[in-house]
Image: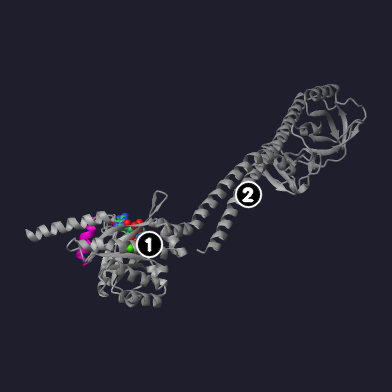
Amino acid sequence: MRRSSGIAIAVAVGSVAVVAPIWISIQLAWNEALANAKSRVQNHASLLVRRSEEAESQLNHAKSLLNAVHFPPCSPEEVALMQQLAVTSNYIQAIGRVSYNQLTCSSLRTSAPIDIGPANLITENGAEERFNVWIFKAQTHPLLVISEDGLAFIVDSSLMEDLPETGPGITVGIFVPSQRQPDLISTANGGIPTSWLRTIPKGSSTTFLDDGYVVSIVRAQQADIAAVAAYPSIYIGQQLQPFAFIFIPLGLICACGLAWAVAHISRIRLSLPAALRSAAKRKEFYVEYQPIINLETLRFVGAEALVRWRRSGRVVRPDEFIPAAEESGVITLITACVAEIVAADLPHLLAIDPDFHIAINLSGPDFLTTDTVNLLRDVLATSHARPCNLHVEATERCFLQADHSRWMIALIRSLGIAVSIDDFGTGYSSLSCLETLGLDALKIDKSFVETIGTDGATSQVVPHIIDMAHSLELVIVAEGIETATQASFLRSRGVHFAQGWLFGKPMNLASLCASLHAQQAVESTKVLG
Ligand code: C2E
Ligand code: CA
Ligand code: CA
């Protein structure tokens, strides 16, 4: 990854890390405020319905009493009872007898008939309703008259609509939902369009947003009545405040945390190549050697040089820095460090076993320059080793440009140094590619070796790789052997060399020399014996 594109990605990820938590927190605060406003509007409409039902039950009670006593209509006894009932009910203002749109007698004690006008609607129960009745001189708002079987009940619906929660723009209304096109029979503060008056099933409710209002409709369980309440959305804004005080600071904290994490990770990632470059200068790299054995004799015949980085007292494993080193090209400096160390160590090993070999790992960028060939030549010259004492392991990623790779392999082999393909099967290499590269050996990756003796989907891959390598007459090395079962399977299949914890973990030069000395001691005892 180039540095500029790395910075661009870091800036993009960082921006998302800052904006996303703040945006999410605003959304959360808005959703909470909206849910809160919806529940308040719904409570408002429910309360209105409950009061309407209460008024309806007072009305039914008065009606059944008046019908039960069988007083002659408009008799003094009936008018007296009407007065008594009107006084004891808090919603009924007056009761009377109605005929031809006139109150012929009533609890109001007027002798002349009172004109109440024609009915606005007839409910599903057969009751007539008049919404706009003006009876008293001092009246400030219209009254509602509900009449049935000749009895009329004058109701002040504003008493029902007088709810505890009021505020600018809050409107409420009552309507008869059984109507084909419902209209308000009463409203406080006005401003309720008929399009909001939806007919919903009995006992249910609905809440929706429309035209800058949160609207709720609640329908009574029994009575043919429904209430509508509407709050302007400014009200949601007011509700937003307490939630915003909680969510937005939380969002800001998350944003800061995420931005810090992105900045921290990008700083590490972007600065890793620079750190590796100075580590190469300061010689912070060292090498451990992992033995390679002959599977027939179990002798140590060679070892792979595995680089380590001692960074501020901590040992960094190659997996943590090799990918970044390969991406940035710094790997060539690391390869040079490893080569220099191997050149210094080889004479110690060859003094014990002159046929011993060390394998050096090469990466893609090493394969792009002939400096690598010169480097290998220098190792041989400095260490006075023979070409057979040095091997090269190149991963499949080195061979992306087949023609160039073939040429590089030929150059290295012209020095007499053997070249193996490393991690075979984990990358892009094909059989046809293997045939033409002119390699000496194939190294089976430990990810395949660990499937030996298991039911895993890739457990059949190892025999195939072995057969293929045999047909191409390549030497086979298997890595990552941890069990005797894996070792005997590979031996039975004709694999020549092996490497793994079963035989030896990566170790320093002194330990490797000690192991070689011990091996020689055993062998000379056998010869003498
Ligand atoms: P690799 O070349 O495939 O090396 C084998 C890795 O497997 C090593 O890990 C080794 O320690 C580990 N290993 C060996 N036997 C066993 C075993 O029986 N069980 C298990 N679980 N692991 C085993 P290491 O040293 O961490 O190296 C990781 C990779 O880093 C290497 O994979 C190689 O790709 C890269 N690397 C290491 N040193 C160098 C180097 O000097 N140059 C380059 N270009 N790459 C290197
Ligand atoms: Ca290797
Ligand atoms: Ca491997």
- Secondary structure under tag 1 reads helix
Relative horizontal placement of residue 95, taking residue 222 as reference (left or right) = right
**Left or right: 406 in relation to 499:** right
Residue 517: image location, x then y, percent: 19, 57
Q: Main secondary structure of the magenta part?
A: helix
Q: Position of residue 238 (x, y in %)?
A: 72, 40
Q: Is residue 361 visible?
A: yes
Residue at image mark 1: 337
Query: Is 237 placed above or below 475 here?
Result: above
Report crowding for label 1: few under 14, some 14 to 19, many 20 or more residues within 10 A (C-alpha): many
Is 364 contained in the magenta span? no
Q: Confirm whether the magenta stretch covers residue 489.
A: yes
Residues rendered magenta in the picture: 482-494
Of 15 and 67, the residue lying toward us:
15
Number of dots carrying numbers? 2
Amino acid type, residue under disc 1 in the picture: Cys
The location of residue 401, given as percent across then percent down, is 42, 74
- Most foreground residue, 4 or 379: 379
Quadrant of the displayed image that contains ligand 1: bottom left
What residue is shown with label 2? 23
Residue type for callout 2: Trp
